[in-house]
Image (cartoon, rainbow, N blue to C red):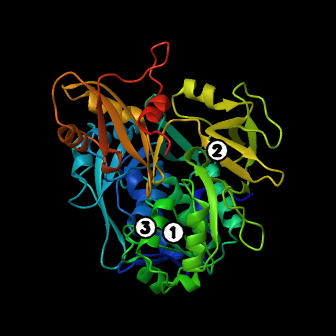
Amino acid sequence: MAGHTLLDVLQHGRPADPAIAVPGGPRLNYRELREQVAAAADHLAQLGVGRNDRVAVVLPNSAEAIVMFLAAATAGTAAPLNAAYKEDEFRFYLQDTAATVLVVPPGQGEAARRAMPPGVALVEAHMDGRGALVMDSDARRDQSRTAGEPGDDDVALVLHTSGTTSRPKLVPLRHRNLFASSGNIASTYGLSPGDVAFCVMPLFHIHGLMASTMATFLSGGLVVVPPKFDPMTFWPALHDHRASWYSAVPTMHQMLLMRNRGERPPGAEGLRFIRSSSSALSPETMAQLESRFGAPVIEAYGMTEASHQMASNPLPPAPRRPGTVGTGTGVRIGIMTDKGELLPQGSNGEVVIRGPNVTDGYSNNPEANAASFVDGWFRTGDQGTLDAGGYLSLIGRLKEMINRGGEKIAPREIDDVLMQHPAVGEAVAFGAPHPSWGEEVVAAVVLKAPVAERELIAFARERLADYKVPRKLYIVDKIPTTATGKVQRRAVAAAFNPPT
């Protein structure tokens, strides 16, 4: 019986076919990719990494980021982290993942290095001029060790997902979950060896790892990995590499539209489709994308706990329904009451899912697992409805996370940082509508000593990644509460974000 691991995903590419291309940088075919993943996994094993040991990977989008992700998932468990985190954030995530190795670029990642717990091995990783991965470390190596092959049930990846009133939850995803998700995505879009994916989503995010990268590898296609999303260079790079599709959050799509003057950009003629996920896409934006770029826009629905994709609109000529996220893709979708009862078609309720790509449960968090799983269904925390064709419409989020351009931010994390300032007595963060990002971070603050708004924002910027920093603070005498004295974040948001 064939295995269902990330290493098995790589076996679908023909050895001499291109697997990874970096604009202006290295190119790897599937034989080279498999060889480099195996060598890097052995190197990690020689540093003491064993099955389920976590390897924190702090690398920008690059060939080495993909190789190190796969190597870490082979030797142990990959824990990719956002390079934009501040030192305190790195300290939390490195401790919470119990990372045994930290991988950074040579001479970079200072905040992560300072946050390293004692006993963590530091590795500097980069591609040399020949496109070979180089790993340097002062840690002791046992060169008799090899990584071996992971099993379907081994945990390949851990990522954090933010709650609204508690610390971020750690989501373990097994090889079989990621294999299933790769297959679901490749099947949904009919990916083949002739497809070229243009990966602009960050590789510390489930969207970039699964939709753009692993699904492409499963189909034997090519992943083009620019170092970052840049609207200025997007179309020239996409044109040069003859990309056939790209996947992004609505914010990125809107940035491309803002720079477009109505003409079809060179390279757009080669696109089979454009995919949008991780945040709601308005029907108006979808229509503009299709009109200007001349490719069908496919909206999908995903989340970390489902190894990304849960639903998607189909490719033409099957009917797409703007305003919906499509039908289940290898996943059963239901609508449930807060008491755990499944509702009939057309009813509004909480979206629940079940399928082989869904996590078995959060790490070391029995309370979250008890609240999130019922009779084999996973509660997404989103409110929605299913029509007669099985198309899912999302009505709103039951959770109070701030969704800034697809980045999910826990308001409690912002509260805690603002409360560290000696002049702050109370703080409640929430999302405010934003024309490009969807939502922006703002907060209501009660002071106990005079302080300027700009000083509080600068204080937060020193302790939070830039996308989490409040763009506006409301200095108030009192935070709105319910009749019982409880702070309800949704009520606070409504008080400061009146309907327009």
Instruction: Report the disc number at residue 110.
Output: none
* Quarter of the figure that contains the N terminus: bottom right
Q: Is residue 166 above or below residue 41?
A: above
Name the spot of residue 492 as percent of width and height, x first: 44, 30
Under mark 1, the amino acid is Arg
Name the spot of residue 248 as percent of width and height, x first: 51, 63
Q: Distance between the residues labelled 3 and 2?
A: 25 Å
Q: Residue at x 68, y 69 (%)?
A: 189
Q: Mark 3 points at which residue?
A: 255
Q: Residue at x 67, y 61 (%)?
A: 322
Nearest to the observer: residue 146 or residue 286 = 286
Instruction: Find out whether the residues at labels 1 and 3 contact each other: C-beta distance under 8 Å.
Output: no
Name the spot of residue 352 as percent of width and height, x first: 70, 39
Instruction: Report the disc number at residue 395.
Output: 2
Q: In this view, does 57 lie above or below 358?
A: below
Secondary element type, mark 2: strand
Say whether residue 472 is visible.
yes
- Label 3 or label 2, whichever comes before in sequence order: 3
